[in-house]
Image (cartoon, rainbow, N blue to C red):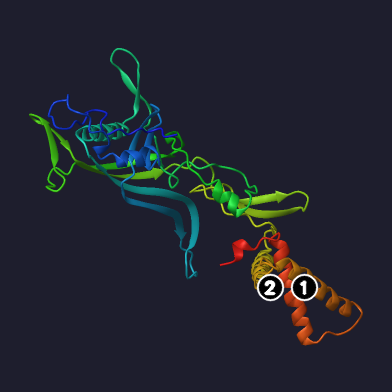
Amino acid sequence: MSQGIFKQQNYKNITLGSQLDDGPDAGHLSPATTDGLANQAEAVLSFFHVPSETDVFFKAFITTFSENYSSDWTPDTVFGRTDPIYTFKNTTRNITLGWKIPADTIGEAYENLGRVQKLAQFLYPNYADLGSNINTLSQSPLVRLKLMNLVSSGTSSEYRDYGSAGLLFDKYVSANNPSQGLLGVITSVNINHNLENAAAGVIQTAPNTILPKLIEVSIDFKVIHESVLGWGPFEDLEAEEQFSYFKDNSFPYNAPLEIEKSQFPIGGYDAKIADRQAKERGREAAEQDRANAVARGYNGMFGKKRFEKDIKRAERLNRKKDAGETLSDRQQNKLDYLESAIEGYVAAEGDLSSYID
């Protein structure tokens, strides 16, 4: 459900064949495709002013989006050491964001100016009225920035198994809710009304009154982390061992990766790599099994009969081995091939159609 609604004719209706408002409505002839992208696909960016709980949305005509993670280290030079000793302080995250705000109609030009106006208001704090025209600052102008799935507050969570890779991907969605934006402070806003740009131009609506057709905005945003971020030990009480994990597995894009099924304690990195390689070999072997099953034609017209015949051939060769007879290289290769094809067919549950080009 879109929470920021865009309607190009909201402030000024567009009519045909008349300069007055009594002509036929332009309807679909109004270039409102960008409204559809914003309202239906929710291709928007939003700001949420925390003290006033007020929001403002913009269509996501992004021109600049970059993030900078900066780690602060204090060097301590020690006599006799080639390099200083570095003491870690903290890591900060800064975002630079720029976007264009075009207007296709007079009403949209007016609305764009109003939305930029509201964003400028978000730079100012809340005041408390103490009476007798005395105001005191009560809340700093903290802001939440939301840019679809790339900039959001995330879901802080302790270590847990998030499921399979396919399930993780299917669950990867973003809500169009500005209150779920990333908390921080806007340190600068640059607004360019493009008055000097002849290609953009302005709309003069009345004497001494103009509306920019294109506004460009850029901001610098410093993130305030709302949870402690870093690596820590996960205690397995049954195994009496510790496993390393990141405290918020969704930081910063809410896109956690599949957790390896077999975990290894801290200090067991070599075993983890060996297990990862074994899984990859198993995956490759499974693909080869399915390829062999396809090559045997198990999914063809006479595939079931061939499958049953291959099972009997494999059983005969295995009985010879069980009886102590040494198979020739040719027989062993044949057995390996048949067992691979049979395993591929069984693993595919009898349906190899998705593996056939």
Viewer can see residue 197: yes
Q: Nearer the viewer, residue 188 or 76?
A: 188
Quadrant housing residue 209: top left
Name which residue lies at 73% across and 63% down.
346
Q: Is residue 357 left or right of residue 263?
A: left
Q: Quadrant of residue 259?
A: bottom right
Q: Is residue 110 left or right of residue 45?
A: left
Amino acid found under the numbered disc labelled 1: Asp
How crowded is the residue under tag 1: few (<14 C-alpha within 10 Å), some, or many (20+)? some
Q: Quadrant of residue 312?
A: bottom right
* Residue 21, image x, y percentages: 17, 25
Please give the label number shown on residue 310.
1
Q: Where does the image place residue 290, in percent across and percent down from the top left?
A: 66, 68
Relative to residue 351, is residue 103 depicted above or below? Answer: above
The residue positioned 17% from the left and 24% from the top of the image is 22
Q: Residue furthest right?
A: 323
Q: Position of residue 69 (x, y in %)?
A: 43, 53
Q: Earlier in the sequence, mark 2 or mark 1?
A: 2
Which three-letter amino acid code belongs to the residue tagged 2? Answer: Arg
Secondary structure under the numbered disc 1 in the rendered image: helix
In the picture of the structure, the residue carrying the numbered disc 2 is 296
- Residue 181, compared with residue 274, is above or below; it is above
Q: What x and y, as percent, mark residue 5?
A: 35, 32
